[in-house]
């Protein structure tokens, strides 16, 4: 809230402040199993796609961004703030970083509108009327203005995911994280969700996207990063990344998925 | 056959007992059940949060409390708490047996409710909790706004069962020796049964217990269905796919 960069009014004006996310030598193990090994990555605005085989650590790296996973060592910086520092105000930094999950995770006891207003009211401390206004605007932006009173269980997967996106965007974050946001969707529903992501990218939102959608990565990303067995092997602009991969591992991976 | 009928359904004796059964017994049963339930829910919630605590020195005493009170016969716990506390000089409620009775039942019920609450809270999808945290909600706000309401809905049926047990447990405070005016339904019926050398007053009390417990079950089930569907009637629209558990 005392971040000078955010203007608390949620507008869809294309001029967004650019926030840099920096991962410095991130290592993380689950028990004896190392999942990230000294990963360095800079996301300087724009859209970065994280790709790699399952178990490569891409989701874990993403979850380190807002400290849903705490790295064993290394630092994560959101703008100038290190969320991994012992004294960091994690809850406040999290309000600057929105996250969308593979399985949506809407609040099952609230309707669509209240899913979106909950954090606005209890974190941003907006009154109900203001929160509802913001929520309706966000629902409209994802094409679900008519679904405000529905329960999450009454929506399709694609609709639920768009509500989840609206819920995150309502907080007016500087950075958005997408953790395989289309993987749980039926193929015909993927398009609508990717369209929302494209819009956001066009507005200049800083986005970090774990995805299996290679076409999306090529068309939308400014940077594509490849993780394999916990190591970041390559990070490059999409043309370079897809057309002239340097590592043998990436070449083999791209051969399999393309 | 008429001997059978007179044993269980002796109408004159039932009618003679009925006024005090309703005025004194039913009233006290309801008051005791409500007081004990409040104690049970409050302490049960605290113990449930304690059981989920990351701190061993919080978790451990809660575990011990729950294990002991769930492991003892109710009648024993009610004697120990209801008679033991005043005897030991812990006269929290002075000579007011009623207070000890409510506390005793409440403490026993809390141990069961703690486990019910805990199972409900821990059954809340971790991803939903992560979604809340990722929006910047603090740990406490996430508990209050997400984990409690979602978890409680999941355990509503189990909780109803527990409230019914509370109502039935109030009969056990008979053991603590309530004075006239403080007697709950079972005590009233039992006294009358002894005086009249008839089982019939107990049958009447039984009917009254059922008159509370059975409607309660149905009321909560209806409420539960309504919460699941998110709308007051289930008729108009076919229920959506049941919430995946």
Image (tube, rainbow, N blue to C red):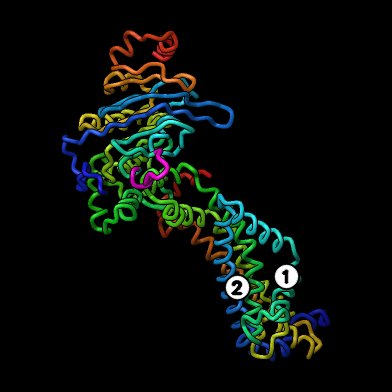
- Residue B217: x %, y % from top left: 58, 65
The correct choice, above or below, for B150 with respect to A222 in the image is: below
Picture quadrant of residue B32: bottom right
Can residue A250 be seen from the camera position used here? yes
- Residue A216: x %, y % from top left: 31, 22
**Chain ID, mark 1:** B
Query: Label 1's element?
Result: helix
The residue lying toward the viewer, choosing from A138 and B142, is B142
Q: Is residue A155 magenta?
A: no
The correct choice, above or below, for B185 with respect to A29 in the image is: below
The correct choice, above or below, for B217 with respect to B3 in the image is: above
Q: Which residues are magenta?
A: A84-93
- Residue B111: x %, y % from top left: 64, 62
**Chain ID, mark 2:** B
For the C terminus of chain A, the image quarter is: top left
Picture quadrant of residue B96: bottom right
Is B125 positioned to the left or the right of A151 in the image? right
- Residue A170: x %, y % from top left: 28, 45
The correct choice, above or below, for B27 with respect to B226 in the image is: below
Task: Measure the C-alpha gap from mark 1 to mark 2.
Answer: 14 Å
Can residue B235 be seen from the camera position used here? no
Q: Residue at x 70, y 58 (%)?
A: B67
Picture quadrant of residue A96: top left
Name the residue beneath numbered marker 1.
B77
Q: Is residue A90 magenta?
A: yes
Name the residue beneath numbered marker 2.
B36
């Amino acid at each position: 809230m005392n971040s000078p960069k955010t203007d608390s009014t949620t507008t869809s004006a294309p001029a967004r402040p650019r926030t840099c996310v920096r991962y410095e030598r991130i290592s993380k193990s689950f028990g004896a199993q190392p999942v990230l090994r000294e990963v360095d990555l800079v996301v300087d605005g724009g859209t970065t796609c994280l790709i790699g085989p399952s178990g490569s650590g891409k989701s874990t790296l993403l979850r380190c961004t807002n400290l849903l996973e705490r790295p064993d060592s290394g630092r994560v910086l959101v703008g100038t703030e290190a969320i991994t520092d012992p004294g960091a105000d994690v809850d406040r930094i999290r309000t600057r970083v929105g996250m969308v999950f593979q399985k949506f995770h809407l609040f099952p006891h609230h309707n669509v509108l209240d899913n979106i207003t909950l954090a606005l009211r209890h974190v941003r401390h907006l009154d109900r009327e203001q929160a509802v206004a913001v929520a309706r605007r966000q629902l409209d932006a994802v094409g679900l203005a008519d679904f405000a009173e529905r329960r999450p269980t009454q929506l399709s997967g694609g609709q639920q995911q768009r509500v989840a996106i609206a819920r995150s965007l309502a907080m007016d974050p500087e950075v958005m994280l997408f953790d395989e946001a289309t993987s749980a969707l039926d193929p015909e529903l993927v398009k609508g969700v990717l369209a929302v992501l494209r819009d956001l990218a066009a507005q200049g939102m800083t986005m970090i996207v774990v995805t299996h959608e290679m076409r999306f990565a090529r068309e939308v990303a400014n940077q594509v990063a490849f993780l394999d067995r916990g190591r970041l092997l390559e990070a490059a602009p999409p043309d370079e990344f897809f057309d002239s991969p340097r590592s043998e591992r990436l070449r083999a991976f791209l051969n399999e998925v393309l | 056959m008429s001997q059978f009928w007179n044993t269980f359904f002796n109408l004159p004796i039932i009618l003679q007992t009925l006024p005090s059964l309703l005025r004194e017994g039913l009233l006290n049963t309801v008051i005791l059940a409500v007081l004990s339930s409040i104690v049970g829910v409050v302490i049960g919630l605290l113990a449930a949060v304690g059981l989920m605590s990351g701190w061993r020195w919080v978790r451990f005493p809660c575990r011990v409390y729950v294990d002991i009170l769930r492991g003892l016969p109710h009648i024993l716990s009610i004697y120990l708490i209801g008679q033991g506390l005043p005897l030991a000089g812990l006269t929290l409620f002075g000579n007011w047996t009623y207070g000890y009775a409510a506390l005793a039942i409440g403490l026993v019920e809390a141990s069961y409710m703690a486990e019910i609450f805990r199972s409900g809270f821990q059954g809340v999808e971790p991803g939903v909790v992560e979604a809340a945290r990722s929006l910047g909600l603090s740990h406490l706000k996430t508990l209050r706004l997400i984990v409690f309401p979602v978890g409680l809905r999941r355990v509503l049926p189990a909780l109803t069962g527990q409230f019914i047990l509370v109502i039935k447990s109030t009969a056990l405070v008979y053991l603590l020796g309530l004075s006239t005016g403080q007697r709950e339904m079972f005590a009233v019926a039992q006294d009358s049964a002894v005086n009249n050398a008839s089982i019939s007053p107990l049958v009447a009390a039984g009917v009254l217990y059922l008159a509370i417990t059975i409607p309660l079950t149905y009321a909560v089930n209806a409420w539960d269905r309504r919460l699941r569907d998110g709308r007051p009637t289930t008729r108009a629209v076919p229920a959506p796919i049941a919430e995946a558990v």
